[in-house]
Image: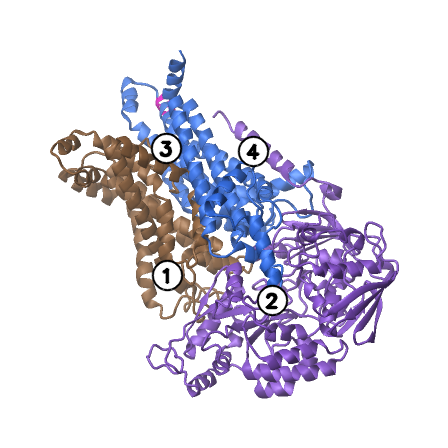
Chain colours: A purple, B brown, C blue
Amino acid sequence: MKSLRLPAALAALVMVASACSGEGGEGGGSEGYPRNETLYTTGTAWGPPTNWNPIMEGNYAVGTVGLVYEPLFLFDPNENEYTPWLAESDEWPDENTHVITLREGVEWTDGEPLVAEDVVTTLELGHFDIHYSNVWDYLESAEATGEREVTLTFSEPRPQEWMNWVSARAIVPDHIWADKDESKVTDDPNQDPVGTGAYVYENHADDRMVWKRNDDWWGTEALGLEMKPTYIVDIVNASNDVTMNMLNNHEIDLSNNFLPGIDQVINDDNNITSYYAGAPYMQSANTAWLIPNHEHPALGDPVFRSALAHAIDLEQIVTGPYTNLVEPADPSGLLPQWDDYIDHELVSEEGFSFDASEAVAILEEAGYLDEDGDGFVETPDGEEITLTLEVPSGWTDWMESANVIAGNAQEVGINVEPAFPEHDLLIENFRKAEFDLMINNDRGLSNTPWTYYDFIFQLPINEQQTTANYARYENEEAWDLTQQLAAVPADDVEGAAEITSDLQEIFLEDLPIIPLWYNGMWSQASNNVWTNWPSEASDTPDNFATMWNNMYQMGAIYTLAEIELAE
Amino acid sequence: MSNIPGAPGAADGASAPEAVGERKVSETLHFARRNPKLLIGSSIVLILLLTGLIGPLFVDHGPNEYVGPQSQPPSSEYWFGTTTFGQDIWAQFVHGLRSTFFTGALGGGIAFVVGTTIGFVAGYKGGIVDEILNMLTNVVLVLPGMVVLIVAVAYLDVRGLLVQALFIGLTSWPWAARAVRSQALSLATRDYVDLARLSGRRTWRIITSEVAPNMSSYLVMSFILLFGGAILIAAGLDFIGLGPAGGVSLGLMLENAVGWSALQLGMWWWFIPPGTGITVLVGSMYILNVGLDEVFNPKLREL
Amino acid sequence: MWRYMGRKIGIYGITFVVAVTINWMIPRFMPGDPVSSMLSRASISDPEALERMTAYYNDVFGLDTPLHQQYFSFWAGLFRGDLGISVWLYPEPVTDIILRAVPFTVGLLLPAIILSWIIGNRFGAFAARSKILDNTLLPIGYILTATPYMWIALLLAWALAVNGGFFPTAGGYSFALTPSFSWVFISNLLSHWFLPFLSMFVVALGGWAIGMRNMIIYELEADYSNYLQALGAPRRLIRRYAFRNAMLPQITGLAVQLGTLIAGALLTEIVFNYPGLGTLMLNSLNNRDFFLLQGIFLFVVIGVLIANFIIDIIYVLVDPRTRVQMTGGSS
């Protein structure tokens, strides 16, 4: 131990060793991506990128669908209309037939042209067990009736549901995917994705995904869209505080997750902005629902659910954990973007609002009384009611909100305790109906409120409920109406609104699930390098500034062309 | 898994304690009263203990209730300010101290009981018993305790203070067992122990009446080190989200402050108290320990 | 001496078997079914499809074979270097994921441990010399060693990265770079490495300094020191002997402290979002990826065993008693 030379040398050796061990360095990264050509984003990837397979929904690197693989149409939720994307035009010769014509001059990144067979193959993949296999419930055939013309024949017309597929699902190339067997399709990481999109795979590491602009992209010519960033570096989510640090230092340009206290940062730092300059700062993306398990004797009773709904002081949640970053949901639960579908008259008459004494009155009238004097009501039969409200561990905002809801419920005499199981455990439990109460927001903004009603009313109830109707609410009439809604032509808003009005009547009467607040489309941007982010101001764009899955298809892709380099 | 590298007795090389006599007690007290390390350390620990015990009695609302205005810096009404949600940080602090002491005492206590028992039996019995116990100790010692804890605690469905303390206790004893064993080994060969053995007394009796009293000072110090170590481990577990659900502790306060961006939003009153609380508490225990060492071990007094 | 090493290796062998068994056992009794967690993310609504896929994944993960068979195939897989497939990062093999993270953790731990040990010992020996130094350095040392790792990491991040802006706040290297053997990249790597390293170093430093200081004082009061002093040996010489003797327990202390140091590294990594095993462990926990958690646990245990073994060798080489035995034994 003569001097520190040995340890210093050792340390250097370790450094070199760790330097060599990363991903093989190729491309122009050795000097770094130039700051003014690169968009740094975070908030969407919850784990290292491991696959680029657009069929592995929920598993692929964020951006795989949207940046690399593209859908036939985009859906514009502001205008409530479909914008042709890979498709050039479409028509409905009759109720059961949809003809889609593809754009000319679109090429896959390997040089092959986009052809009708690509769409057919993409649909045919649905014969394997993948996330959109259910299209074949109502689709009879998909045929290439021309080089760039696809004819779809339906056994049962469900335009709303079908247009959801058309505007959300990405098309994959026939010449690569047609020969894959089932395990290849559902399991292959697809390391070298060949798409039609504006960006291509550049690089990845465990904490980042790098996309590079595709300078031959068809959209530049066809749509006049020029993607501004040469590189998009999507940083895998770190903890709130780490993200906040990076945003404060303007090391990232766009953050797409909930950052507590971001309102203070937006107010203090003029270079960090969100869609709205004041509360609620964010646009709404989905509804957070309080989901009761209808198999529970008390929660299966609409009167009890109504009392519970009246007991919750949403204002306290909105101002407390969320510091006004969210807004209370409409009693119908429908998103503000679906305002046309809300029957406001009905909602103002039948809707619930926070009123603790009303909640107590409802309970009393229905015979839910506290006979044993423990401060909590029992069922009319005199059985104790103890409910657990579960939210995933680590979802700090929801955990705090669950605490508030439990406190509110206890005030009116309903014994609710919060619990924070691991996310997967919670999923497993609620699928098997092993829960009392939980908060959930699995369905978000889409092209049609049908997705919400499908979520609420879907029948039949299976042993495991994996994507919808976690509450296990059984109402044949409501499910019939929901199916009718699926069959309404995509552009018939009034026709759809008539059905949704009926659905809302049932919904408000029974309250199968209780709408809480609108989760924000979390989006906070730094204006140091890139400006012209979407905002409420009239001179800025109005598309979504988000990298979330399925939002590119709702116009977020435009944002990449609309942002501008800061002076 | 103690946190004190090479603390007295942490390794095998420390000197064996001497027999305790009547006259030594008063002598010890004499030095104890004059040892600043002991006095300062113990008074800080005592003050914190009293705060944790009495403090909650004077707070009339729960530590997690929304009671006041949001994000307020310390004021005469809310001594330590409030959180983003308007929770009283002082209330959280005193409740947190209480549970921190609880975890430390119980976790450290369990480790102490397990460690000393194994150490004594191994050291005194020797032979095959020693071989087996020593091997067990070494195996547990080599296993990285925190990592085992993370895996084990993650496995639990319901997490509470009690379970947390129990698990910490069950993984952090080997260090103490090893130290006690080496002490017991040297004591076991002393004449008076041989005498006791010849007189046909039971092993357990000999350990409790002859061996243990002669290393009581050593045992007290081991307990304090285990206590401090348990607090640090618990804070670490709390910080990564494996703390007691719905409870309060200094580690959980730290986790919450960080999770809700207190550092970035300049809410120093939220993250300073819990971190300082843990550091000061454990640090004072260590200093108190050095003081004790100097008092019990006359050779160290002269410096 | 060979007997001593043999015993040690035996203990490490047993520890390894115990660790592997714990490792295999614990996750299997965890609540939550990895297969259904995998499927939850692939949103399939058709119950038949769900059933088929569950069967498929059960096969992949080997959960439907009898327990003892799972245990043996676990060992067999271990020797092939196969720790299974990650649920969270499906379909990547666990070993690959871990191997990517290991260099970062080792790069953080090794320098922090070695430097803090050497410098801490120096400080400690130095402090033991005078009452004034002792009274100032000692409390600082105790406060440092009592500081939770994540707390000092947070304070450093806050002071030097967020407010000071001297260092980056998170990550292993700049998000603008791809790993390459260039000066830009290595210097960037270093700047990201520095703060996590510093926080680990500082906490560990206090512990070693105190340990050394205490050891030296014990040694100086030992009979041989008094004897030497009585013989009129120079103080320097006595101190040198004391220092040498105090080194031995400090080396043992290194082995004892490894677990704590690793725990510290895990917590520090989490604060800085450093892409090592700690961050990976937290992620695998949050995603209930038990194959990954299992793999990390095993890697940490193997690392600790190797480190212990190295420390044993060093101990034998340094300890004059065993050294004598060695030369004596070979003749």
Q: Which residue is mark 3?
A: C128
> Residue C311 location in percent, x, y?
44, 30
| Marks 4/2: CA–CA distance | 51 Å
Quadrant of image for the C terminus of chain A:
bottom right
Residue depth check, mark 4 versus mark 2: number of the one nearer the observer: 2
The reply to the same-chain question for discs 4 and 1 is no
Residue depth check, mark 3 versus mark 4: number of the one nearer the observer: 4
Residue C47: numbered disc: none
Q: Which residue is mark 1?
A: B94
Disc 4 marks a residue whose amino acid type is Ala
Disc 1 marks a residue whose amino acid type is Val
Residue A467: numbered disc: 2
Q: Label 1: state its secondary structure.
A: helix
Q: Label 4: state its secondary structure.
A: helix
Q: Chain of mark 3?
A: C
* Magenta stretch, overall SS: helix
Find out whether residue C237 is within the magenta segment: yes
Residue depth check, mark 3 versus mark 2: number of the one nearer the observer: 2
Task: Categorize mark 2 by other alpha carbons within 10 Å: few (<14), some (14-19), many (20+).
Answer: some
Residue depth check, mark 3 versus mark 1: number of the one nearer the observer: 1
Q: Residue at x 43, y 61 (%)?
A: B245
> Residue B88 location in percent, x, y?
43, 66
> Residue B166 location in percent, x, y?
35, 52
Instruction: Give the residues in magenta.
Output: C235-240
